[in-house]
Image: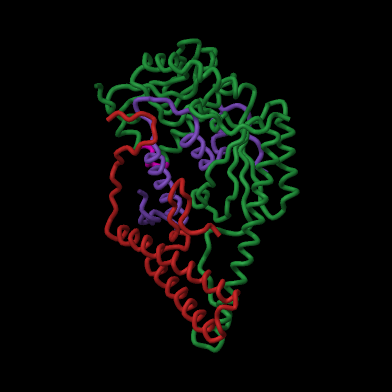
Amino acid sequence: MTAPLPKSGADAATWDRVALVDLLDRVLTTGVVISGEVTLSIADVDLVYVSVHALVSSVRAGGPGPVPLRGARP
Amino acid sequence: MASLTAGTGVWVYAICADIDDGRLSGVVGVDREPVRAVRAAGLTAVVGSVPLTEFGEEGLPRNLNDLARLESIARAHHRVVEIVADHGPAVPTRLATVYQDTDRIAGMLARRHDDFIAALGRVARRREWGVKVYGDRPEPATAVTPPLGASPGSPGAGTAYLRDRRQQLADRDVSHRTALAAAEAVHADLSGHAVAARRHRPQDPQLRGESRWMVLNGAYLVDDDIAEAFAAAVAACADRYRDVTIESTGPWPPYSFADIEDDADLTQGPP
Amino acid sequence: MIHPASWEPSPRPRIEVDREDAERGLASLVLTVVELIRQLMERQAVRRMEEGDLDDEQIERMGSTLMALAGQMVRLREHFGLAPEDLNLDLGPLGTLLPRD
């Protein structure tokens, strides 16, 4: 089981304790949605996920490479 | 109408009742800007001024599509949210909520005052825990390899292939059902220890860099008083449901329970 | 353009892809559909076999055909540099196209 995070968020060294994917899950798709002048819409979130996915794939393949498109998004 | 690609905007991190300015001193945000409090209608928005070239209509998609920038922005946003939530009840804002100016923020606080008060009440002295459950097989399905020793055309190869496939599908069905049943049981169990529970979409396995099949991506709002009991419940689930793997993250600020439009699923009630 | 925080698509920046990526993207779409049909056919064949709906010769013929088809799919996939998980359309809130097993 993953250990709980330390309480204080002020320590930059604790950054890496939070897995990026767990963090993105939360800050991109949860949190209160209020009507700012610029906000994320679902399409924007999808776009972010496509990019992150592409980068993860290229990293796993051992270096920068062509974007493996997984299928068109509407 | 003002352009949203130049000049300065205001990035919102979280809403709370109030926060000591000293608590925000030295805290920086997504643009390494000093964060500050905007107070209106008995509420406080924790904000930072950011350049719209980077965080406006054009800059934001560009930054979010750059993984290094996205990570830096997300972590910085989260760090401010954590500091606010550590101080007292707070409603985290979704990433990338930018206003033209603080007057509009003040107006928003006044308009949604009652909603925010209710939301703050729901999360007071509570934290979010994430629990993920994985099946023990990789997903998605890989192509079936022909039975060992058989080549297309050799006698009985086709029949052996179909039988092999039948066995595989049957095994997958059992494994599939077991994992899903475990996920339901874990969710029900943990919901009983939580004030509210929510199921998120399973995470993309490739984003995690792994191939395990995620059957539950749960978020639980738990009273601070019983955080240890909740952790014990998670450990007990891991012990009981051996066909699956259980991971937990947290505590988090209550991102998944911040909605002021719809209510998060409410469970039967606190223990 | 101002867009409020509602569930409406916003104009997205265009992703520039080169020709090779476009071909691979198209191939993954096409092969995903073919793969879906292949899996459905296999499941139906297995079901019919279990129900006693096929005689031995039919089972052998169907199995050989499906086996050859599976092999072809692997070759096609590899030709385009696609991994098995690339052939699974994620339809967002609707979930994935192929069953996640």
To which quarter of the image does residue A64 belong? bottom left
Residue C66 spot, x, y in % from top left: 48, 76
Is B264 left or right of C22, judged from the image as shown? Answer: right
State the residue at coordinates (38%, 56%).
A68
Question: What is the drawing colour of chain B?
Answer: green
Residue B115 spot, x, y in % from top left: 50, 20
Query: Residue lying furthest bottom in this view?
Result: B155
Q: Is residue B251 visible?
A: no
Residue B43 is inside the magenta segment? no
Number of dots carrying numbers: 0
Is C11 left or right of A6, judged from the image as shown? Answer: left
Which chain is in purple here?
A
Viewer-proximal residue, B82 or B199?
Answer: B199
Range drawn in magenta: B63-67
Which chain is in red here?
C
Residue B25 spot, x, y in % from top left: 50, 16
Residue B65 is inside the magenta segment? yes
Viewer-proximal residue, C89 or B7?
Answer: C89
> Which quarter of the rendered picture does the N terminus of chain B lie within?
top left
Is B75 left or right of B271, judged from the image as shown? Answer: left
Main SS type for the magenta part? helix
Residue B103 spot, x, y in % from top left: 37, 13
Q: Is residue C63 visible?
A: yes
